[in-house]
Image: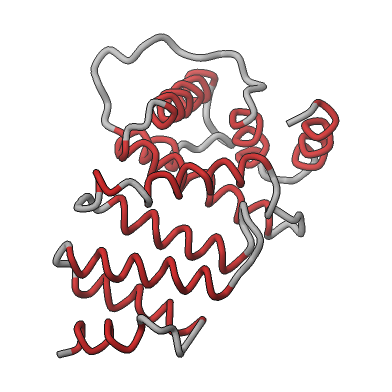
């Protein structure tokens, strides 16, 4: 992301009423520099995400903000190291941020943070080594949402439906029948005549 782009988005978000959104954006592009020292004990990536999401930056003190930045940086580092759970959680968090930006009226199909989140989630979803892990079908569903709404990629109803179908198939293979049905419903709501939909529906509803 070049300096002019950073200044444009920083300027826009800085004057939004949400301090959380401003600080989140600053953290995401590396403008914050106060990173806490290493954690005294290992914190798994689910707990890191929970702490990040639940941090109230509007009312937090300096220590709260420092911990937020440290947790965010740690999750990003693990994702860059290709840890599956961290890739999923960091991708999901950036996806949620991109949704918030899109809701302000900004196009996010080519916003660097959003395109990188899309690329990371796709890499996770395409890695058959992790096929039985819940994060893979979840990543597939997030990709469906991103294609559906044009987040990090150009919008495509068919490609969105295709990723929901993949998610449904993987959830079914993992024994998650209810999750598979929900993903299938999402797929067919976008493309009712998807070629894989009829057979999958028969399999799930028999």
Q: Position of residue 53 (x, y in %)?
A: 44, 42
User: The C terminus is located in which quarter?
Assistant: bottom left
Q: Quadrant of residue 57?
A: top right
- The structure residue drawn at horizontal position 33% and vertical position 46%, both measured from the top left corner, is 127
Above-or-below relation of 55 to 156:
above
Above-or-below relation of 149 to 122:
below
User: The N terminus is located in which quarter?
Assistant: top right
Q: Give the number of callouts.
A: 0
Q: Position of residue 77 (x, y in %)?
A: 43, 24
In the drawing, does residue 151 fall left or right of residue 123? right
Q: Which of the colour schemes (rainbow, by chain, secondary structure, one colour) is used?
A: secondary structure
In the drawing, does residue 80 fall left or right of residue 131? right
Above-or-below relation of 182 to 155:
below
- The structure residue drawn at horizontal position 51% and vertical position 24%, both measured from the top left corner, is 69
Q: Position of residue 190 (x, y in %)?
A: 51, 81
Taking depth in this image into account, of 162 and 3 the one nearest to the observer is 162
- The structure residue drawn at horizontal position 33% and vertical position 76%, both measured from the top left corner, is 182
| Residue sitting farthest toward the top | 37
Q: Position of residue 10 (x, y in %)?
A: 77, 34
| Residue sitting farthest toward the front | 195
Taking depth in this image into account, of 166 and 3 the one nearest to the observer is 166
Q: Quadrant of residue 116?
A: top right
């Amino acid at each position: 992301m070049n300096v002019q782009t950073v200044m444009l988005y920083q300027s826009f978000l800085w004057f939004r009423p949400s301090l959380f959104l401003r600080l989140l954006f600053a953290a995401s592009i590396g403008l914050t520099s106060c990173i806490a020292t290493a954690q005294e004990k290992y914190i798994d990536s689910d707990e890191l995400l929970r702490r990040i999401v639940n941090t109230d930056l509007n009312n937090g003190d300096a220590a709260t903000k420092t911990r937020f930045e440290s947790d965010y940086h740690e999750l990003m580092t693990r994702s860059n190291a290709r840890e599956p759970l961290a890739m999923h959680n960091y991708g999901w968090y950036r996806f949620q941020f991109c949704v918030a930006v899109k809701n302000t009226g900004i196009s996010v199909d080519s916003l660097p943070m959003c395109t990188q989140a899309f690329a990371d989630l796709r890499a996770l979803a395409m890695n058959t080594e992790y096929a039985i892990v819940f994060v893979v079908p979840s990543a597939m569903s997030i990709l469906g949402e991103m294609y559906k709404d044009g987040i990090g990629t150009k919008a495509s109803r068919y490609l969105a439906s295709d990723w929901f179908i993949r998610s449904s198939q993987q959830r079914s293979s993992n024994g998650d029948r209810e999750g598979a049905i929900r993903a299938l419903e999402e797929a067919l709501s976008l493309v009712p005549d998807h070629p894989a939909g009829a057979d999958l529906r028969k399999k799930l509803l028999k």
